[in-house]
Image (cartoon, rainbow, N blue to C red):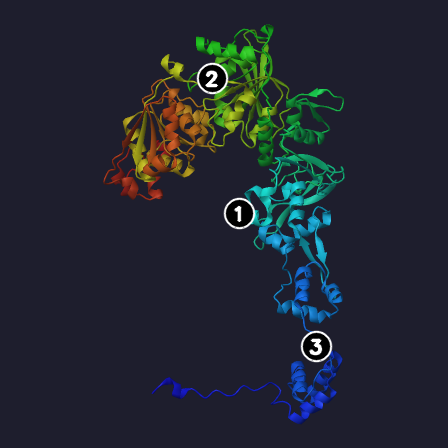
Amino acid sequence: MSNTEFLSPRKPRQVEGQSLLSMDECRQIAGEFDGTTERIDALLEKWSAIKPGVKRHTIIRAAKRGGYQTTKDRKDWTPEEDRFLRENWHRMSADEIAAALGRGFNSVNLRRKRIGIGRYDGEDLTIRDLEEQTRIDHRQWHDFVARGWLRPRQRGRRKGAAPITYVSVNALRSLLKEHPEIYDYRRAPKATIVALELDRLPDPPAWKRVVCRSSSWREQIKPTPTGRTVTHGAAPMEMRLHTFRHRSCEEEGGTPFWALLYASPSCPRCGCQVSRYSEEGLFTDLDPGNDEVIDIQARKLGLTWRDGKLRDANGNVVSDRDILSSLFSAGRRAARSIKAFENLLDAGLSLAQSKPVAPHRLLANILDIELRADQEQALQTFVETGSMTAAHAMSFGKSTLGMMAMTRIAGRHLLMVDTQLLREQWIEKLTTLAPRIAVGRCHKPAKHVLTIYDREGTVRCVIDIFSYQTRARLDGPWVVGCFDEVHRLPAALAHRHAFARTEYRIGLSSTPDLRCDGRGAFVSRMTGALVGDDWTEQMCTGVVKRIPVKVILVEDREHKHEVVGEILRQYGSVVVLCEAIEDGRELELRYGIPFIHSQTKHKLKVLRAARSMVLSRIGDTGISVPHCEVTVDHSGLFGSRIQSLQRLGRLMHSDRARFHCVLMTRVERYERFAGRVEAIRKKGFEVVEEVAARKEASVQRLLSPALQARVSAQENPYLSMLGWLKDSLSRAA
């Protein structure tokens, strides 16, 4: 049986209105119908009450069915009228065309639709066309019209509708010639270049003149959010009152400056985003330089920038250090402060001024130590220049140079250190070498004060020791500024200490230019030119030891702990350097050696009393362990080259050095932290790689942390698991 047998027969199409209105009713409607809107509305109101469902078109069709015929004479459209309509539809309004042709609006509008003329068709471009071609929002194009930059024409519409805006290609090209910053037409798509004829435009300039008229700044006390408050419910923003004292750019009448043509500039005065359109219409291909920007920033401080110098209101030159020491105070956010500092250094700012030490100021040596010939040469470089960064290798004696510089020049000096352990070691060295020393401590601001006496009992100098982490304002003045581990100085918080008022300055670090953030290049501008950064001669003369370096490949962290245990059993004095506090505590519990970290009390005493030890990051730099045989780089701060070299340097200070060991997994060695090893190799040290074999059974791997704490390094681990010989860890150590 075919499917067609199940299909119902198609019903004949029924004209709408035949089922609603009878012929007599249609004739009745035709008798009243005259085609006007008012009459149709009246008939619709009447018949919709009688026949529910009657619509407006039902009335019209019923009138035609009832015999209604219009009395108007129909006027056909001629080809000349159609041509006029096509040529002028987008130039004249529909009412103007109807008046010109002697026709009504509806007749013109219907004829336009029948011959296929679209509402927005034509030779010229609409705002929507420009938006599609350039991807610039239509509101921006209307803004250009309102500013008077773009000269369009508008076609009126009826009943208060918004006029249609048309832009000719010539008007668009004129706009881009006068304001090339609007659109990067040299990088436009090919279709856009062809459609808008952009290839006929000249090459755009490189710079534009913009004006900041922001009103964001004004003198007020305003609460600003500082972060989320810690609560049990919803975390609202914690507010802090800030005082704003500067007048806004709008109140100053605008801040003009030069910017790159297609950049979205920020105001150098207030930091607000500035319109990228040049309201003055000024452009140039010549690089305007940074003088104007620096002058704008200087005016915020009541200064001016002329001829490459900062000048006060009287035209006198203001030194960089004086003005910037107050500008980069601890009250500014560190992240924003360091960015501004980098910009100034890139512009040529230098804080290390060349000022030789006068011969009469260089006094006799009072320390119980004599300099080698190379050390004497380095000290002479400091005397001749007044500023120097000693970048010699570890164990060269850089701290000795710092002590000589401070004790042979009378006055009050500044010493910046990185850790408490380094501060204690400086005090230890000066106490040992100086005839007499008095140590004091201040709390506001936190610092240690060392008073150094000569052999006659006269005060030779006073040294203020600050940490790089201090937020105190270092006003000074000081005679010599000594910056130990000077690679810390360009950090986000510590960089402001470079503005301390010192007459002379010396920086000490074997790795001043190896910072991963690239700020190591600024060290020479902070403390002076690098001296001794080439270690080749120091190694050839034997001043610096060529320590063998072993890179031991392990499987995991537990395997690292096991290798440390093997090294501790083979050598009498081992220094293990680790990154994580958890690893340090684990090694302390497992092998009974002290773990020295930031919370350890009397760090230097513990370090001097121990044969083997574990050091956290506080022992990475500057620390001397003369009896050490092996140093172990257990785990580090990612791929830090500074940390890798500095940890090798702990062994270079030793008289019994054997080798430096770096523990790494294969992923760390070849994929993640290869830079740590390459930094050592580039400095001329021989690096040998080994694979550590893992023992089949390890009792320590079976013990829980609670049991490990009760097992000493000397007792039988199997008996300890049974509860025998339960000595405390400290007693076993």
Q: Is residue 446 visible?
A: no
Q: Nearer the viewer, residue 712 or 515?
A: 515
Would you say 288 lies left or right of 706 here?
right
Would you say 681 lies left or right of 290 here?
left
Question: Residue, x 57% and y 36% (percent of image)?
Answer: 335
Circle 2 is placed at which residue position? 398
Per the image, label 1 sits on a secondary structure element best described as: helix
The disc placed on residue 721 is none
**Circles 1 and 2: CB atoms closer than 8 Å:** no
- The amino acid sitting under disc 2 is Lys
Q: Is residue 3 visible?
A: yes
- The amino acid sitting under disc 1 is Lys
- Height in image: 139 above or below 286? below
Q: Quadrant of residue 681?
A: top left
Sequence-wise, the earlier of marks 3 and 2 is 3
- The outermost residue toward the bottom is 24
- Check disc 3: other Cα within 10 Å, few if <14, some if 14-19, many if 20+: few
Residue 284 point in image, percent of width and height: 65, 33
Q: Quadrant of residue 607?
A: top left
Circle 3 is placed at which residue position? 74
Question: Residue, x 35% and y 86% (percent of image)?
Answer: 2
- Height in image: 121 above or below 654? below
The disc placed on residue 190 is 1
- Height in image: 45 above or below 686? below
Residue 677 point in image, percent of width and height: 36, 29
Q: Quadrant of residue 339?
A: top right
Sequence-wise, the earlier of marks 1 and 3 is 3
**Circles 3 and 2: CB atoms closer than 8 Å:** no
Would you say 344 lies left or right of 599 here?
right
Q: Nearer the viewer, residue 414 or 545?
A: 545
Label 1 and label 2: CA atoms lie apart by 64 Å
Per the image, label 2 sits on a secondary structure element best described as: helix
